[in-house]
Image: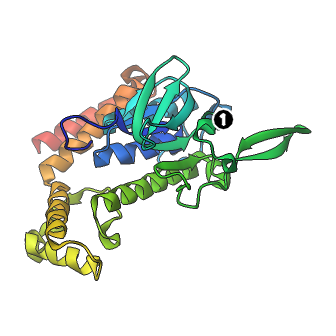
Amino acid sequence: MSSTDEPATDYDVVVVGGGPAGSSAGVFTSRYGLDTVVFDRGNAALPRCAHLENYLGFPAGVDVDTFHDLMHAHAEEAGCDVVPEMVVSVDRGEQESGFVAATQEGRRVTATYVVVAAWYDGSYLRPLGDDAMFEMHEHHGEPEERFDPDYPDEDGRTPIDGLYVASPAGARSAQAIVAAGNGAHVARCLLADHRREQGYPDGVAPHYDWLRPDAEFSGEWAERDRWREWFHNEVGEDDVDDERLAELRETYVDRAFETRLGESEVEARAERGLQRLVEVIGSERVLDVIDDETIHEYVGTSLESRHG
């Protein structure tokens, strides 16, 4: 959120749709530090899947309900508000900047950015007034209006500033794992645009969401001056006010050092990751699939490793 005392909007980002594309987009925007709400209530394609078997990380697949719960738990862990309400309209704010999203339950929230990630028809975008969003097609022999998946560019940007589309996205919406990747990509494009608005030159506008081990900060890279040098090399010849550029550079370097994790922190986060996974799946379900022999083997190995 902005550093001002009175935020201009309720949220920085509204995500319409909490499936793989929307949840993934929300994880990226929220982890960056943008206040994000994900609305998830409406027609979706994922429930039509009997069992999800091609999403990386689940060796024997995962049932759709569990996958849905894991997605939303991840979004909430990243800092998103996940709200089970259907968005029925998105319009411009009073000053023709930002957006107002209204839900079927009567909730109204304002936001600087909107990420469209809903499978349903897109008619909730009608108040924005751009007919180019929609196209006619034949559905079961009848003409039907639908959101045009070619309205956004390949990065999800649209002619309306602040409006991004992660779904529908044609073939990129056809499989859950592809849709999730597309949602992350669109969110990264939104973040790059947000950083450009803040004054970051193109060379350093893209944001990479990763955490670095201590080893990445060894030698010359342990010094802030080396990161400053890298920053200026990436900026190149962009015409930016020197004082502002110095401020952005220090913020960039600060963020880089905030990604540094020591060994103990890496271990703590790994433990937290497993803990949250079990919490979402349910400890009883986990224990149900572990036989006594496996439990004894695990306990014995764990005790041996702890006591040498």
Q: Please tell me whether mark 1 sits on a helix, a strand or a loop.
A: helix
In this view, 155 is above or below 47: below
Give the left or right position of residue 165, taking residue 263 as reference: right
Q: Determine if residue 107 is in view.
A: yes
**Quadrant assignment for the N terminus:** top left
**Residue 38 position by quadrant:** top left
In the displayed structure image, the side of residue 18 where residue 239 appears, left or right:
left
Crowding near the residue tagged with mark 1, few <14, some 14–19, many ≥20 C-alpha atoms within 10 Å: some
Number of numbered discs visible in the structure rendering: 1
* Residue plotted at (19% across, 57% down): 255
Give the camera-side residue of 195 and 265.
195
Residue 239 found in image quarter: bottom left
Q: Residue furthest front?
A: 95
Residue at the far top: name it. 105
Query: Quick check: can you spot residue 60?
Result: no
Viewer-proximal residue among 275 and 256? 256
Q: Position of residue 225 (x, y in %)?
A: 9, 74
Q: How is the image coloured?
A: rainbow
Q: Nearer the viewer, residue 18 or 105?
A: 105
Q: Amino acid at mark 1?
A: Ser
280 left or right, relative to 168: left
Quarter holding residue 74: top left
Residue 106, position as x, y percentages in the image: 50, 18
Q: Nearer the viewer, residue 142 or 158?
A: 158
* Residue positioned 63% across, 51% down in the render: 169
Name the residue: 31% across, 38% down: 8
| Location of mark 1 (residue) | 123
The residue shown at (52%, 29%) is: 40
Q: Position of residue 205 (x, y in %)?
A: 33, 65
Q: Quadrant of the C terminus?
A: top left
